[in-house]
Amino acid sequence: MNKNASLGLSEDQAQLDLTRLKPDTSNNEYVALKQLIKKRGLLDKQPAYYTFRIALLLGLFTLGLVFFLVVHNSWLQLLNAVYLAFVFTQIGLLGHEAGHRQMFHRSWKHDLIGLVGGNLLVGMSYSWWMDKHNRHHSNPNQVDMDPDIEIPFLEFTGKEDLQTLGKFRQFLIKRQAYILFPALMIVSAGLQYNSVAFLLRNKPKYIVLEWVLLGAHFLLYFALVFAFLSIWQALLFILIHQALTGFYLGSIFAPNHKGMPVLDRENKMGFLQRQVLTARNIYAHPVTDFWYGGLNYQIEHHLFPSMPRNKLKEAQQIVKAFCQEHDIAYHETTMIQSFREILQYLHEIGSPLRKASRTAGSL
């Protein structure tokens, strides 16, 4: 594996080589940047904006539900499954923003939105997401510390001796660039499984309410689908809805950090550089801003997690200029190029296993 790949880099990202960067030995730079951001009011809560978004998403959800209940055409219901995958993902993004306390001045309002949106509407534990996501934000792309790079059937770190892994996992890693997109289709099922597992192992603040809301979600979801559709239609509806929800969610979150520098557990890089260098932005555009729920401004989001979505674009101008002034590499690209970088990186990680297989085959 080449030097850049071992760092978590594609060839196109050689300028982000961590060995060429000065260590961030203090928080002074981040404090200065945060003062610029606060002076512009970009961390102020946005209750009016989020009240509108909540009302909009509830309206879209209700529209899909009413369509399901009153339209008795099975083929149209499959289109509704596609529509609801989009709506569920957008609700999930809203729950993500609630978890970061971006909306209102009172924490209980964020918890309410997270519990109703996550547990009841989407079927994902709010407390599980908070636990996992907070660890990710504290240690992005850091080996053994960021849960988002600990995926059983894929290898993102390049730090493990792949030859010691089981044969099946080696088989997957050798081909992981090809299985990434199919794997995204099980993201939704994985979130639901991990939600239940987390609640069985832990006792979060709202554990009773979480179980009630999560149970209500699954009961109502399956009861409605099997009550209004034939068995095969119901199974196809669930398959399409869950696969596309997972694919949409995964396609939003994958470009954020996958294929970017991976840090050793012992890395002492300061907060500012750690958050900027491990993140990737997707170029701003009204369509991408909406589609990604603001997460295309991943660098700004990681630097200021509580910043409301509608302030990220303005913050980007400040952050980009600040990074340029302080010689901190700031990576921004197109949606398509982001996946090229991810696939190239995954393919490079699996290269030693493919070479070993070819060598063994030639003996």
Image (cartoon, rainbow, N blue to C red):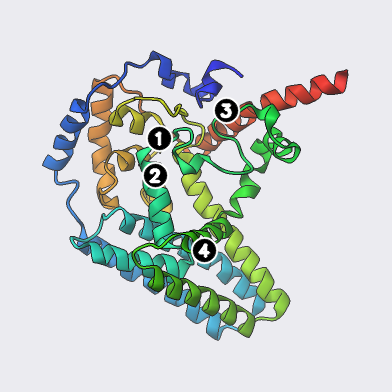
Residue under the image location 71 percent in, 27 percent down: 353
Q: Position of residue 259 (x, y in %)?
A: 51, 32
User: Seen in the image, is 51 located left or right of residue 243?
Assistant: left
The residue beneath circle 3 is 158
- Number of other residues with Cα within 10 Å of mark 3, as a class: few under 14, some 14 to 19, many 20 or more: some
Q: Position of residue 136 (x, y in %)?
A: 41, 43
The residue beneath circle 1 is 279
Q: Nearer the viewer, residue 293 or 355?
A: 355
Q: Amino acid under label 1? A: Ala
Q: Amino acid under label 2? A: Arg
* Comparing labels 1 and 4, the label whose residue is closer to the camera: 4
Residue 227 lies, with reference to residue 79, above or below; the image says below
CB contact under 8 Å: marks 2 and 1 = no
Q: Report the Cα–Cα distance between label 3 and label 1.
A: 18 Å
Q: Earlier in the sequence, mark 2 or mark 4?
A: 2
Q: Amino acid under label 4? A: Val
Q: Earlier in the sequence, mark 3 or mark 1?
A: 3
Q: Report the Cα–Cα distance between label 2 and label 1.
A: 15 Å
Q: Secondary structure at mark 1?
A: loop
Q: Report the Cα–Cα distance between label 1 and label 4.
A: 29 Å
Quarter holding the N terminus is top right
User: Seen in the image, is 262 located left or right of residue 226?
Assistant: left
- Number of other residues with Cα within 10 Å of mark 4, as a class: few under 14, some 14 to 19, many 20 or more: some
User: In this rendering, does residue 295 appear at all?
Assistant: no
* Comparing labels 3 and 4, the label whose residue is closer to the camera: 4
Q: Secondary structure at mark 2?
A: helix
Q: Secondary structure at mark 4?
A: helix
The residue beneath circle 4 is 196
* Comparing labels 2 and 1, the label whose residue is closer to the camera: 2
Picture quarter containing residue 326? top left
The residue beneath circle 2 is 135
